[in-house]
Amino acid sequence: MSEKHTLAFQLAPQDQTRLGELVGQLNAHLRLIEEQLHVQIGNRGHLFQVEGDEGRCAQARFVIENLYAQTGSGVLNADDVHLALRDAGATLAGEIAARDEGKDIRIETRRGTISGRGSNQRRYLRRIFEHAVNFGIGPAGTGKTYLAVAAAVSYLAEDKVRKLVLVRPAVEAGERLGFLPGDMTQKVDPYLRPLYDALNDMLGGERVAKL
């Protein structure tokens, strides 16, 4: 259960006619915002107070200020409120995403702290932690495998997973694994070597052997 948050703000310029257009008949517009965002809204004149989840409170303020800016140019209706709610959701989602882009995920390993070096690596690492399945596409040597292994090691260290499963890349068109020379280990090992190298680097060979 999220912590209840209170957000107070004041609308300007103060105009009773515009305020009446904003809140609607019998405060219908405010009640609609409350219903859609699951917050409680109170006001004394142009001073408003919103209670609820912190993110929803910020969204409610955005909607109220946006609607107030529209007053005076026409009578607001329920459709205007719904449109403002939709715009608020899209705008705040974009702001949160932009803010999160600047955050740096740091993974502690035996070797030290591992983090993305550039914006692409930081975004790639963040996506790994946000989604169950990810595809990393790019030229060799850009850190795709190493960062993926670092994320896996982090999950293992935090007991979020019990084991790591290593698989070789998909067989290319016209290639058959059975026709490659050597036993199964010799066939697969070259493809898994970058994974093992990264694991040995982060955990040490002795621990990797016990996994």
Image (cartoon, rainbow, N blue to C red):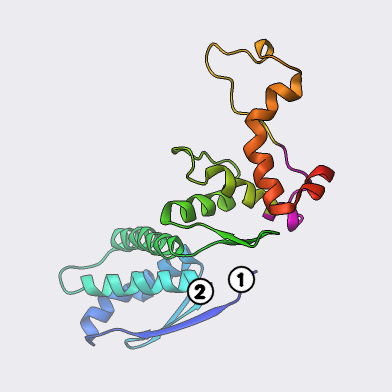
Q: Quadrant of residue 26?
A: bottom left
> Could you tell me residue 84's position as x and y percent?
32, 63
Q: Determine the residue positioned at 28% across, 63% down.
A: 77
Label ID, residue 209: none
Q: Find out whether residue 148 is within the magenta segment.
A: no
Please, what is the three-letter code of the amino acid marked with disc 1? Ser
Secondary element at tag 1 = loop
Mark 1 neighbour density, 10 Å: few (under 14) some (14–19) many (20 or more)? few
> Reading the chain from its start, which is encountered first: label 2 or label 1?
1
> Could you tell me residue 129's position as x and y percent?
59, 52
> Where are the magenta residues, as a range?
154-165
Q: Nearer the viewer, residue 109 or 197?
A: 197
Q: Determine the residue positioned at 54% across, 19% down.
A: 172
Q: Read off the residue under disc 1.
A: 2
Please, what is the three-letter code of the amino acid marked with disc 2? Glu
Q: Read off the residue under disc 2.
A: 54
* Disc 2 + disc 1, Cβ < 8 Å: yes
> Could you tell me residue 27's position as x and y percent?
37, 75
Side of 111 relative to 137 (left or right)? right
Q: Is residue 156 above or below residue 36?
A: above
